[in-house]
Amino acid sequence: MARPTLYDAAGGAPAMLALAADFHARCLADPILEHPFSHTGNPEHVQRLADYWGEVLGGPPVFSAHAGGHSAMLRVHAGQGGDHALSTRFAEVFDEAVVATLPADPALRAALHDYMLAAVAEVDTYMPPSAVVPENARMPHWSWR
Ligand code: HEM
């Protein structure tokens, strides 16, 4: 039998939503990440995050269908002039949220950890004020390592 996707191993859509909600709450409570997040208030943010991560991890393409795909995600962050400390902390807090909400599977945790390091590295490249996001950037698809 084929190995389940990371999305299915995590628990599907409800697990993505739990992960995103826990992650977002941790960001708001974090001394480093609180600042960028305190200036926004998209009421759909947690659901969007859940849809995005779900799609990357092997779930349905909800973010591409309804929220503009990978280019739109990059555009939200592009030119913000953020620094490496934000990305480092973002990835650490993601690991904490994974531990708090998803199954205690070391392989799942390792794959999600690796994914988030790659994801923050990509977002980082668009932080400079002059950054230009390409149209139709390919949505990453992440699997077991
Ligand atoms: C330096 C690290 C990052 C910071 C400080 C950051 C911060 C933010 C902020 C402030 C928003 C807007 C929230 C709102 O509208 O209420 C946002 C949106 C979002 N972020 Fe990030 N982010 C970071 C990295 C990432 C990474 C690595 C990913 C993906 C793996 C990601 C995925 C998203 C998504 C999917 C949205 C919602 C886009 C939409 O509304 O369509 N972010 N982020």
Image (cartoon, rainbow, N blue to C red):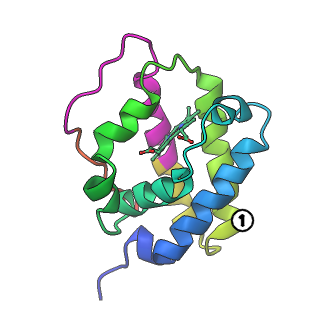
Picture coordinates of residue 55, whole percent (x, y): 35, 61
Q: Which quadrant is home to the N terminus?
A: bottom left
Q: Which residue is mark 1?
A: 100
Q: What are the residue bounds of the magenta stretch?
A: 116-136
The local secondary structure at tag 1 comes to: helix
Question: Is residue 107 visible from the viewing direction of this image?
Answer: no
Residue type at numbered disc 1: Ala
| Residue sitting at x 73%, y 43% | 28
The stretch drawn in magenta includes residue 8 = no
Residue that protrudes farthest toward the bottom in the picture: 1
Nearest the camera: 121 or 36? Answer: 36
Compared to 67, does 105 lie above or below?
below
Q: Quadrant of the C terminus?
A: bottom left
Q: Quadrant of residue 29?
A: top right
Q: Is residue 140 left or right of residue 35?
A: left
Q: What is the x, y in percent for residue 16?
A: 52, 66
Front-lying residue, 117 or 26: 26
Where residue 57 sits, quadrant-wise, is: bottom left
Residue 105 locus on image (x, y percent): 59, 73
Q: Residue at x 46, y 50 (%)?
A: 115
Asked whether residue 46 is in view, the answer is yes
Residue at (55% x, 66% y) in the render:
17
The answer to whether residue 29 is above or below residue 104 is above
Whole-percent x, y for residue 90 in the image = 62, 39
26 or 116: nearer the eye? 26
- For this rendering, which residue is in front, 31 or 91? 31
Describe residue 130's horizontal placement relative to residue 138 as left or right.
right
**Above or below 79: residue 15:** below
